[in-house]
Amino acid sequence: RLPFEITGPLARPGTRIGPFSDLRHWGGSPRPLRVGVVGAGTGGGGVVAPQGGLPGLIRITGVAVRGERRPRPDLPAGVPVTNEARAVLASGCEVLLELAGGTEPAGDIVHAALSAGMSVITANKALLALRGAELAAVAERNGAGLHGSAAVGGGMPAIECVRAAVRHGPVRRITGVLNGTCNYVLDRIAGGASFEASVRDAQEAGFAEADPSLDLDGIDAASKLAVLVREAWGVNPDIRTTGIRETGLPANPRTGGVQRLVARAARGAGGRLAATVGPEFLDPSEFLAGARGVGNRLEVELESGQVLQATGAGAGRWPTALAVLSDLSRAVGARSARATAGRQAQVA
Ligand code: HSE
């Protein structure tokens, strides 16, 4: 119920909004968006749980979960639960949330949904890094949307930040702290905890991937960087990747240095792209060094020298759910725009 202001990177002072009483004004949707969900773990469970608080906006038509079917008190009552992702595709949804992770079978499900003209919202960075260009083309051919805000940066608007930069001109470099688990583990180690205990805590807190080596070996950050590079330059980069395993971590070359897993991509002379992910000691005054705990930070520099920065909680249930909800609002908005265009065409 608070008034607030909306603006964007490089934009002028924004638009004052509200005070509105709740999210019912969101997208001006005339009827609930029918949403199918594949994966109801950390991220998926967070999206499904609050939708009871968004009356009139979303109706969940089906949820696919892994493993044995058991009572799910965390899901809205009456929602069909299945082990079959394909059954969710056939549940009458307009939008599919793919929150299961892994490249397969998630890739085939997303492909099938887009081919059927269904929009897809995914938090799957591995899939977008591997097949993002192909899936975006399938989406375009079928008039569907492919949204992946939650795939990079969690609650930090990373893809949005790069897109905003691209709208303003060619991008020179992208630099980011893109993995919450590594931050968390490095902070804990700096505070005297053991590597193993820190990783275990990150898993228990729901930050780490099901296979935490994806975080610790830098693969998760590299996938996220690949997604951002494609947004910025339209290419698939080769990324030299080093993780944060305890052995091999470089010694701190400076007093008070802050260690972070840093993702870098930049265009050098002749337009050649160099991309790396690896641990670095940063000066505490640097923007990226301010990423604490599961916080993520991103800096995008344009060829013009202008710099955009974004920060936000990069991992965990609610930051992921928030990013998915922002994509859902885009899907609702796109549907309203299509409906308006259809009405205008009829009038014409
Ligand atoms: N394991 C990931 C991280 C989750 O720690 O950043 C969010 O992508």
Image (spheres, rainbow, N blue to C red):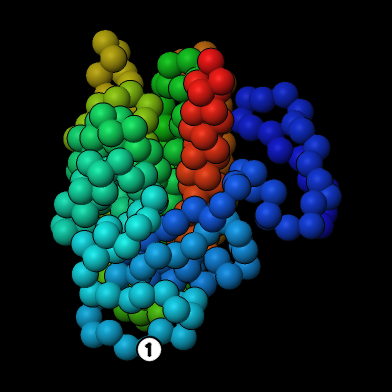
| Location of residue 70 with respect to 175 vertically, above or below | below
Residue 321 location in percent, x, y?
50, 61
Residue most toward the top?
A: 270
Which residue is drawn at the image coordinates 33% and 76% (left, top)?
A: 81
Horizontal side of residue 27 vs 64, given as left or right: right
Mark 1 within 8 Å of ligand 1, using the beta carbon: no
Which residue is drawn at the image coordinates 45% and 79% (left, top)?
A: 78
SS type, badge 1: loop
Which residue is drawn at the image coordinates 60% and 59% (left, top)?
A: 56
Label count reads 1
- Which of the 4 image quadrants contains residue 343? top right
Horizontal side of residue 11 vs 100, given as left or right: right
Which sits in the foreground, 70 or 315?
70
- Which of the 4 image quadrants contains residue 344? top right
Residue 216 location in percent, x, y?
29, 62
Q: Which image quarter is the N terminus in? A: bottom right
Residue for badge 1? 71
Q: Amino acid at mark 1?
A: Pro
Badge 1: residue crowd in 10 Å (few <14, some 14–19, many ≥20)? few
- In this orientation, does residue 24 appear? yes
Which residue is drawn at the image coordinates 35% and 58% (left, top)?
A: 92
| Location of residue 330 with respect to 45 vertically, above or below | above
Which sits in the foreground, 52 or 130?
52
Residue 283 location in percent, x, y?
52, 45
Residue most toward the front?
A: 347
